[in-house]
Image: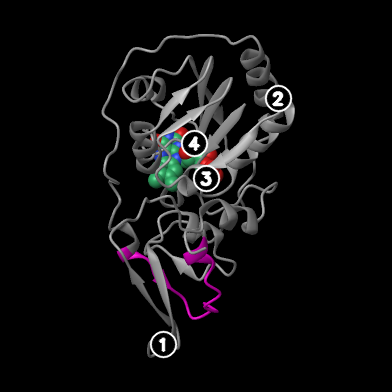
Amino acid sequence: MTLFYFTATGNSLDIAKRLGAELGAQLRSIPLEGATAEVSDDVIGVIFPVYAANVPAIVTRFLRRVRLNAGYTFAIAAHGGEPGDIGGVLATLAAFDNVYTIETWSNYLPFNPDVQPVAVDVSSDIERIAAAIRLKEIRGFKPGGEPFDPAPWHSQALTYRWRKNCTACGTCMKVCPVANYTISETERDANGIPLFKFADSCEGCMACLQNCPNAALYMPNEPTRYRYRNPNITVDEIIAANNQAR
Ligand SMILES: Cc1cc2nc3c(=O)[nH]c(=O)nc-3n(C[C@H](O)[C@H](O)[C@H](O)COP(=O)(O)O)c2cc1C
C-alpha cells in the first residue's frame, strides 16, 4: 500500500502515519514527488487538507499528472468542519473508489479564534476508515465543482509580515512546499529583520505562518495570537515532507 500525503500543519501526515501503521503502507509526500507520472501498488491512497471546499492546488496538479495503478484507490480529506462537496471535486480529477473525510482542527488562520488550538482525536476515524479500506468499500461520487489550478493564493505571501522576534531560523522557508521563500543571509531591514524574497507560487497552505517557532511571521489583522501544529507531528517532520532545498 502506498499513501501519498500533503500537509502544512501535520493533520494529514498524522492521519497518513496512523493509517500506515494500521494497514502497513509506504508514505510519500506529494511536494517531493517531482515529476512522478505513474505509480503501481495493490492499494493507493491520497491524503490532503480541504482548502475552500476544494482540493489544494498542489494536490490538483499531482492528480492531473499522475496515473495511479491499483486494485483499490481512495482519498482522505482532512477538514475543519466544512468539507463541501470534496468527493464531487475529486471525481473531476481521478476515479477514486472511495473518498473519506476526517474532521480536524482548522489551520486556516484568518478564521481561527483567539484561543489555544485543541487537536481533534481522530482515533475512531482511523479505525472506521481502516476497516472500510480492508473491505475495499466503494462509493461513487457525482463530479461537481471546479478544482483549483493554478494556486488561487499565489501572491498571498506578499501580504505576510515579520515581527522583530524573527531569528532568521529559516523554518518558514524549509516548511514551504513550493520553495516560495528565500531569506537573505546577510541583508537586514531597518528593524534588523532579515530580508525575505518571494516567488509567486504561494499555495496558501499556512505552513510558514503556523510553524514559525516564535509566531514572528503573521498576517495583518489576524484574529489570533496562537499557532497550530498537530501535536503528534514535529516541525522536522513537516520540513522533511515539504522542504525543496535539499
Ligand atoms: C487555505 C485554507 C483553506 C481552508 N479551507 C477549509 C474549508 O473550506 N473547509 C474546512 O473544513 N477546512 C478548511 N481548511 C482547514 C484545513 O483543511 C484543515 O485544518 C486540515 O486539517 C489541515 O491539514 P494539514 O494539517 O495536514 O495541513 C483550510 C485551510 C487552509 C490553509
Give the alpha-carbon distance from disc 1 to disc 4, as whole Å: 36 Å
Q: Quadrant of the N terminus?
A: top right
Give the alpha-carbon distance from disc 3 to disc 1, as whole Å: 31 Å
Query: Is the residue at mark 3 in contact range of ligand 1, meaning its CB lies under 8 Å from it?
Result: yes
Residue 87 visible in this rendered orientation of the protein = yes
* Residue with the mark numbered 1: 188
How far across and how far down the image is residue 138, in percent?
51, 9
Q: How is the image coloured?
A: one colour
Q: Could you say whether the residue bearing mark 3 is in a helix, strand or loop? A: loop
* Residue with the mark numbered 4: 48
Q: Nearer the viewer, mark 2 or mark 1?
A: 2
Residue 152 versus residue 121 in the image, above or below: below
Q: Which mark is residue 23?
A: 2
Q: Earlier in the sequence, mark 3 or mark 1?
A: 3
Give the alpha-carbon distance from disc 2 to disc 1, as whole Å: 49 Å
Three-letter amino acid code at the position of disc 1: Arg
Q: Is residue 75 magenta?
A: no
The span picked out in magenta is 158-174
Q: Are marks 3 and 4 in contact (CB under 8 Å)?
A: yes
- For this rendering, which residue is in front, 180 or 10? 180
Query: Is the residue at mark 4 in contact range of ligand 1, meaning its CB lies under 8 Å from it?
Result: yes
Three-letter amino acid code at the position of disc 3: Thr
Q: Is residue 172 magenta?
A: yes
Q: Is residue 195 left or right of residue 132?
A: left
Q: What residue do we see at 64% from left, 42% from top?
A: 119
Q: Are marks 3 and 1 in contact (CB under 8 Å)?
A: no
Task: Spot the residue most to the right.
Answer: 22
Task: Spot the residue most to the bottom.
Answer: 190
Q: Nearer the viewer, mark 2 or mark 3?
A: 2
Three-letter amino acid code at the position of disc 2: Leu
